[in-house]
Amino acid sequence: SQKVTFYEAVGGEETFRRLVHRFYQGVAGDPVLRPLYPEEDLGPAEERFRLFLMQYWGGPGTYSEQRGHPRLRMRHAPFEIGERERDAWLRHMRDAVDELDLHPQAAEMLWDYLSRAAYSLVNSEA
Ligand code: HEM
């Protein structure tokens, strides 16, 4: 029997491209989040995040080929992430997930993971 990954079930790379692109459009216009991003061009950050999510959900392992182990807590340590940043991040992500129009069960799985991950990356009480 063949196992269909979540990555494939929701439409593969194209779906993750749309998700992350829509999310970064939100970040680009957000006065709380935009200043956290070190690069003027958000394109490379968008690509890293897309490759990470594709790999996480069973797609190609390009993220780790390029970046190594994800170590998300460590990689977010340089940025002050409090409740305000987390909630802004989740607001744009909610819009991005909603616009995918996935099967409700798939949308819920994706959202569950993303919201837990966002809570786990808070590193500041400010
Ligand atoms: C990178 C902010 C949550 C995954 C980054 C960067 C910033 C940032 C400023 C650097 C951008 C760059 O790559 O140059 C935040 C904030 C969050 C958050 C404010 C709110 C809680 C998350 C979550 C995930 C995630 C929940 C995963 C589900 C990543 C990945 C990278 C990244 C994969 C690139 C790591 C690398 O290879 O360098 N984030 N992030 N982030 N973030 Fe987040």
Image (cartoon, rainbow, N blue to C red):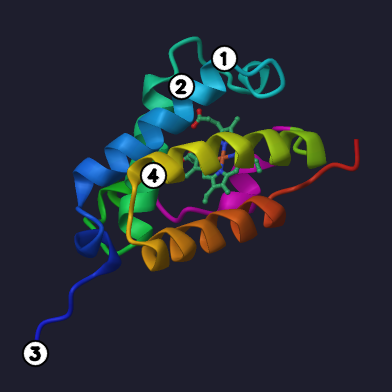
What residue lies at 51% left-to-right and 15% top-to-bottom?
Answer: 39
Q: From the viewer's perspective, is residue 8 above or below residue 83? A: below
- Specify the amino acid type for callout 4: Arg
Mark 2 and mark 1 residues within 8 Å of each other at the beta carbon? yes
- Name the disc covering residue 67, or none: 4
Q: From mark 2 to mark 3, how far is it between C-alphas? A: 40 Å
Quarter occupied by residue 4? bottom left
Considering every residue shown, the one lying at the far bottom of the view is 1
**Amino acid carrying mark 3 in the image:** Ser
Observer-nearest residue: 20 or 99? Answer: 99
Q: Amino acid at mark 1?
A: Gly
Quarter the N terminus occupies: bottom left
The answer to whether mark 4 is within 8 Å of ligand 1 is yes
Alpha carbon distance from label 4 to label 1: 27 Å
Residue 25 shows which numbered tag? 2
Element at label 1: loop
Residue furthest left in the image:
1
Query: Which stretch did the figure color magenta?
Result: 67-79
| In this rendering, position of residue 42 left or right of residue 93 | left
Residue at 50 percent across and 9 percent down: it is: 40
Q: Is residue 108 left or right of residue 38?
A: left
Question: Mark 2 or 3 closer to N-term?
Answer: 3
The vertical placement of 42 against 113, above or below, is above
Amino acid marked by disc 2: Gln
Which quarter holds ligand 1?
Answer: top right
Instruction: Please tell me which residue lies in front, 120 or 26.
Output: 26
Which residue is identified by label 1? 29
Residue 5: x %, y % from top left: 24, 70
Q: Is tag 4's residue or tag 2's residue first in the polypeptide sequence? A: 2
Which is more N-terminal, label 3 or label 4?
3
Q: From the image, tell me which residue sits under label 3.
A: 1
